[in-house]
Image (spheres, helix red, strand yellow):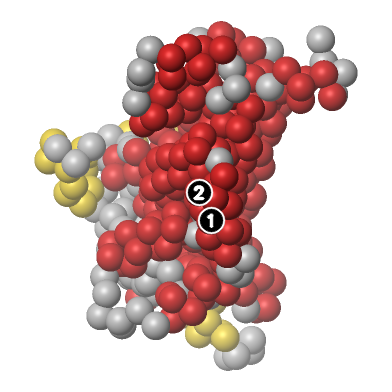
Amino acid sequence: MEVIKKIFQDKFAKAAFIILLALYVIILLADFIAPYSNTYSNRDMSYAPPSKIYTIDENGNYSRPYTYNYIREYEPALMQTVFKQDRSHKYYLRLFPKGEGYKFLGLIPTHRHLFGTAEKGGQLYLLGTDINGRDVFSRLLFGGRISMTVGFLSLLVVFPIGLLYGGISGYFGGIVDTLMMRFAEAIMAIPSFYLLIILAAILPSGMTSVQRFALIVVILALIGWAGFARVVRGMVLSIKKEDFVQAEKTIGASNLRIILKHILPQTTSYVIIAMTLSVPSYILAESGLSFLGLGIQQPDASWGNMLKEAQEFTNILYRPWLLTPGLLIFIAVLSFNLLGDAIRDILDPKSRAGKGIR
């Protein structure tokens, strides 16, 4: 609680914490907040622009929020398809309308969504649609579940391995330490991103996105533990000389007990800092793989494979709403870095002294 209190005293860290908390709450409630499901598609509305929401009617009076459906037409003069509003019928917006069925929090069956059109047949695309006529806003929420959780799932593998490996290496020292560190350095020498590309490229084409997601998590974890273990080993080398460790040896405590119960807990501050600062790299790695078509596959969404569609020049020029996933990746990574820096300043006295913080 003291750490959170100090975080809120730093305006940048406070903003980052609130943004990340909001992002995780939103993706947790994605089924409820999103107007459409992850599988919704309307091919007739391919690349439809964002829906316009009006609060003033044609007579200049204030009105309940409403929108018009789009009509897709071919414009001979422009030699391209254009979208025009069908102003023959208004679709009023309302809270908690009925929509596609889902299970709230994966448990409670319901058809209620946070917002939508009051009548059936109304179209509401807050951020437009993609090439397959899928609502970009809804897919951003569902894609965030993958992009924002891959880092934490990887950490569940990286940190136990790194802590134990580095703890054993530093505690025993000598030939054990030399051999273990040489192996860790060999792992660190592997160009991780290129390895990810190679491994992802040779995966069977029949794998589901869930299986690919799990494999990406494992791959990221297996190549990310070595650097963390090396730092832990350096900390253990100094901690094992402390009096309380020598006292435990004197009373006959086992080596494993000393490492797990007395040495590794002393690295807690660094572990928390490293976890916070490591998540952005995993988010970027997953997004990069999905952007290259080697990660999460369509029709499942992640911010990386959604951003892939925006790489075409015409889409950047005429359909800027497709760039929204890149903006969210930038905001999430920046927020994690700001929060990680703040936690490091709070938990690491040397870091604070180096910055002149009192």
What is the secondary structure assignment of the residue under circle 2? Answer: helix
Counting other residues with Cα less than 10 Å from the Cα at mark 1, is it few (<14), some (14-19), or many (20 or more)? few
Q: Is residue 334 above or below residue 194?
A: above
Tag 2: residue type? Val
Location of residue 189 in the rendering, given as x and y in whole percent from the top left corner: 62, 65
Residue drawn where x is 44% and y is 81% of the image: 201
Q: Name above or below for residue 284 compared with residue 193.
A: above
Q: Which residue is mark 2?
A: 176
Which amino acid lies under the numbered mark 1 shown in the image of this protein? Leu
Callout 2 environment at 10 Å: few (<14), some (14 to 19), or many (20+)?
Answer: few
Q: Which mark, residue 179?
A: 1
Most foreground residue, 230 or 2: 230
Judging depth in this view, the residue of 93 and 232 nearest the camera is 232
Residue drawn at point x = 34 percent, y = 43 percent: 30
Residue closest to the eye, 247 or 187: 247
Q: Name the quadrant of the C terminus.
A: top right
The residue nearer to you, when weighing 48 against 324, is 324
Q: Position of residue 97 (x, y in %)?
A: 26, 40
Left or right: 94 with respect to 326? left
Asked whether the residues under the numbered discs 1 and 2 touch, taking CB atoms below 8 Å apart as contact, a structural biologist would say yes
Q: Is 67 left or right of 12, judged from the image as shown?
A: left
Tell me if residue 294 comes above or below residue 332 in the rendering. Answer: below
Would you place residue 325 above or below residue 246 in this image?
Answer: below
